[in-house]
Image (spheres, grey):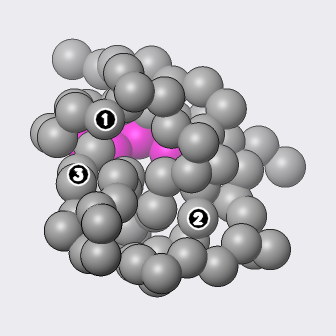
């Protein structure tokens, strides 16, 4: 099931580094398959994607969000 999450993109210095979405609700999601255009710290976005319960990562900063699309917000 696809979900939409609004928040701010952050780069976390864990291991080799990981891109995350800090939702307006305060929850942190690790971004998976995020396009390069989404790799910008402090970018306010709405991301549409899937929560992947079948994926583990080294960073383990929160649920893994597989990015299907995104929209930059003002």
Q: Give, as a single range, the part of the protein colored magenta.
A: 3-8
* Res. 26 in view: no
Looking at the rendered structure, the secondary structure element under dot 3 is strand
Disc 1 versus disc 2: distance between alpha carbons? 16 Å
**Is residue 33 found left or right of 17 in the rendered image?**
right
**Which residue bears the numbered disc 3?**
10
Q: Position of residue 58 (x, y in %)?
A: 48, 81
Task: Tell me the quadrant of the picture where the C terminus can be found.
Answer: top left
Q: Is residue 4 magenta?
A: yes
- State the mark number for residue 39: 1
Relative placement, left or right, of 13 versus 36 is left
Left or right: residue 14 versus residue 56 is left
- Residue that carries the numbered disc 2 in the rendered image: 64
Q: Is residue 29 above or below residue 11?
A: below
Q: Nearer the viewer, residue 16 or 64?
A: 16
- Mark 1 or 2, nearer chain start: 1
Position of residue 8 measured from the top left corner of the image (x, y, whole percent): 26, 44
Number of residues whose C-alpha sits closer than 10 Å to that of mark 1, classed few (under 14), some (14–19) or many (20 or more): some
Of residue 42 and residue 58, the one placed in the foreground of this image is 58
Q: Secondary structure at mark 2?
A: strand
Instruction: Indicate left or right for 38 with 69 as reference.
Output: left
Sooner in the amino-acid sequence: mark 3 or mark 2: 3
Residue at 57% in and 51% down: 32
- Residue 35 seen anywhere in this rendered image of the structure: yes
**Nearest-to-viewer mark from 1 and 2:** 1
């Amino acid at each position: 099931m696809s979900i939409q999450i609004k928040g701010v993109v952050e780069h976390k210095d864990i291991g080799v580094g990981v891109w995350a979405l800090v939702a307006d609700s305060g929850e942190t999601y690790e971004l998976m398959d995020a396009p390069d255009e989404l790799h910008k710290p402090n970018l306010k976005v709405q991301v549409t994607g899937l929560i992947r319960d079948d994926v583990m990562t080294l960073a383990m900063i929160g649920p893994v969000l597989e990015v299907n699309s995104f929209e930059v917000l003002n």
